[in-house]
Amino acid sequence: MSVESVQQDLAGQDYLADRALATAVHLAITLEQPILLEGEAGVGKTEVAKALAAIRGAKLIRLQCHEGIDVHHAVYDWDFQRQLLAIRAAEAGADAGDLYSRRYLLRRPLLEAIEHDGPVVLLIDEIDRSDDEFEAFLLELLSDFQVSIPELGTIVAQTRPIVVLTSNRTRELHDALKRRCLYHWIDYPSVQREIEIVRARLPGVPDAVAERVCGAVARLREHDLYKQPGVGETITWARALLALGDEATLEDTLGVALKVREDVERVRAEGVLG
Amino acid sequence: MVERAVSELAARMRAAGARVGVDAVLAAHRALAAVDPSSREDCFHALRAALCSSRRDLAAFDAAWVATFVTPHDPGGDPGALDAIMDAARMVLPRVAQPAPTRMPLQAGDEPLPAAYSDAELLIDKDFAAYTAAERVAARALLARLARRGPQRLSRRTRATRRRRDVHDARATLRGALRTGGEPVARRYREPVLRQRPMVLVVDVSGSMEPYARMLLQYVQAAVAARRRVEAFALGTRLTRVTRELGGRDPDRALARAGERVVDLGGGTRIGAALGELNRVHGRRLGRGSVVVILSDGWDRGDPAQLSAEMARLARTAYRLVWLNPLAAAASYEPLTRGMQAALPHTDHLLPGNSLASLQMLADLMETLA
C-alpha cells in the first residue's frame, strides 16, 4: 500500500485525487485516524468517502448531520410502537420477552458502523451543521469506537472503521475534535484536472465540450461571485451542452452553473464568457 | 535528528499562531513512518496532514517547512535536514518531550469598580466621545452585562416538558406506561429549547468613527467573549475578521491583538466594498439565521450603488439587519450622507450607537427578535 496505489485506486473509481489528497487518504487508512475534509461546496468531499469505500471493498455508512441531531438519531433508539404492542400482547398472555432487548432496538448509522462485521467506511457528512453537544459526543466515539446503551451495556467495534468527516465551514469546529483528525483542504481543481474529471465522469464527451466548459468555469471562479460553481456544476453543465447539441451556447445554459441572480447578471454584463 | 526537525516545524508553526499539540507531533512521526521516506513530496503532504488542523494552519505550515528544510543558499533544500527526515522510516513512536506546564501567578483583579452605583448610572447617557480613560474602564462591567443579551431562536433540539405541546415524547410515555402496568395513562411531550441566535458584528474603525470605535470595539469584544457564535469584523477600506483576536478572557489583550490585526485603523471607509467581501468570502459563516449589526456613521468614500447592492444582498441572507449610527443620537439627525441614504432602505432597524443607553436599546431590540 503506497500513496501511488491509493491515487490509482481512487482514479479507478473515477475519482481523480491530487497527490496531497491521496497522501491524506493513505494516512487515514494506515494510521486508522479519522480524516477531516474541508472545502468549498461542490469540490467532491463526500465523493472521497464513496470512492474510498469502493476501493476498500467496505460498506459505506453515512450519517448526515443536522441541527439538533442527538444520540437517538445517530446511534440507537427504541422501537416504541412495538414495545407498546408487546406490552398489550403480554397482557393477553403472550410472552414478549425483555422490553429492552435487541428485538426492540433500532440501529442508527453509528451503531451500525460499530457493529458491522467487516470493513466499514463511516462518512460523517456536514459535521458543522450539528451542534456542540453532538460534537462532544462524537469526540468520545472517535477515540474509543464504543458506545454505551444503558439497557444493554457497552458495545465495542470489532474493526475500527475508516472515518471521513466533511465540513462546509459554516462554523469553526471544536479544536479538540480537529486534533483527533487528519486534515485536508480540498481546493477547486485546475483547468486541466477538471477536464480530466469531466472526461472520467462523462465517458464519450467530446474534448471540445469538456475544454469549453472547464475553461468557462475557471474564468467564472476568477470573478468575485456570491456563489462560485463547484465541480458538480461543471459536470452538469457539460451534460447540459451534450443534451442540447450543437446549437446550445454557454450563455444560454448559464443557469446550470450560477444560481444567484446578481451573479448571472454580472457575468452577462461584463461578458465574462466572451 | 528527526525529532528535532519535526519539533522545529511544530515550533515554527506555533510561533506563526497555529495550534499544534503534542498529539499532533506524535501523529506527525507516525505519519512519516507510513510514507516513502525518500519522497520529499510525500513527507511534505504527510506532515501537513498531521500537523495542520484548519485551513489557516496551511500557510503557517508552508512557511515553517521552507524555514526548516530550505536554506537560502541551497534552493533545493538542506540535505542534512532532509536526511534526518529519512530516518523516519526507522523510527517507531519516538519520545517527545513535553515541557513542564508553567503556571503564571494569578494577579489580583485590579479592575476599578465604580465607587457607587450612581457612578455607573451617570455613564449611561454619556456620549462615548466624551469618555475619559477611567470611565471606559468603569463602563466595562456594564458593557459585559449588555453583551450577554442578544437574539435567540428556537432550536430543533427538544427537551422533555410537563406542559402540553405538539411533539409527543414516545420514550417518556412508554417509561410512564411501564410504571402503570403497561397502560399509557399520561402522555408526555417535548418542546424545543431556546438557543442563542448567531450574531455578526461589523464595526467601522475609520477615522471619522475614532471617538466611538474604542467603546464599540469593547462592546464587540464583550459579545465575542460572552456569547457563542458571534463573528466580529472591523470595517475600513477593507474588511478584517477579528473574531479569533477578540476571543479570550482578558479584554485589554484581546483589543490589543485586534488592533495589531487591523491595518487600516483610523483610515478611510469603503463600506460597500467591505460588505461585498463579507457577502462573498464569509457568506457561509454568516449563516441564514444571523442578526447582522453594523456599527458605523455611514461616511463612505466608496460607490453608493455598490453599497446599496451589497446591503440588499446582506439583508436577504441575514435574519435581521441592524444599523447602529452614533450620529443618529442627535434629535435633528437626518441620514444625509450618501452612504447612509444608500444603506437605509435595506436596514430593518436604525438605532443610535453613541452611549450605553443606546446599546441597551440594541439589547432590548435583539431580545424581541426571538
Image (cartoon, coloured by chain):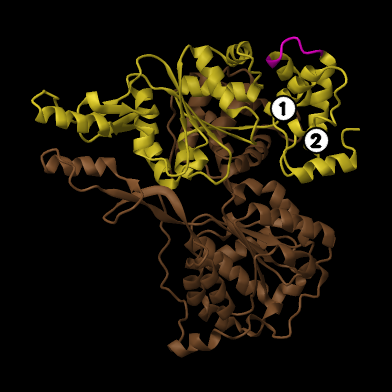
Chain colours: A yellow, B brown
**Quadrant assignment, res A147:** top left
What's the distance in space between the residues labelled 2 and 1, CA to CA?
13 Å
Residue at the front extreme of this rendering = A92
Residue B268, position as x, y percentages in the image: 80, 66
Q: Which residue is mark 2?
A: A220
Q: Which residues are magenta?
A: A201-206
Image quadrant for the C terminus of chain A?
A: top right
**Quadrant assignment, res B10:** top right
The question of residue A68 being in magenta is answered with no
Q: Is B57 drawn above or below residue B154 in the view shown?
A: above
Other-residue count near label 1 (Cα within 10 Å), few / some / many at <14 / 14–19 / ≥20: some
Q: Is B195 drawn above or below residue B62 in the view shown?
A: below
Q: Which badge, 2 or 1, is on the more N-terminal residue? A: 1
- Residue at left offset 61%, top offset 25%: A21
- Residue at left offset 57%, top offset 44%: A170
Left or right: residue B97 compared with residue B74: left
Using the image as rendered, state which of residue B360 and residue A144 is in the foreground.
B360
Question: Marks 2 and 1: which is nearer the front?
Answer: 2
Amino acid type, mark 2:
Leu
The question of residue A205 being in magenta is answered with yes
Judging from the image, mark 1 belongs to the subunit labelled A
Q: Is B82 drawn above or below residue B52 in the view shown?
A: above
Left or right: residue A233 compared with residue A143: right
Residue A19, position as x, y percentages in the image: 65, 21
Using the image as rendered, state which of residue B273 and residue B167 is in the foreground.
B167
Numbered label attached to residue B65: none
Q: Which residue is mark 1?
A: A189
Amino acid type, mark 1:
Pro
Residue B38, position as x, y percentages in the image: 62, 17
- Residue at left offset 60%, top offset 48%: B285
Judging from the image, mark 2 belongs to the subunit labelled A
Other-residue count near label 2 (Cα within 10 Å), few / some / many at <14 / 14–19 / ≥20: some
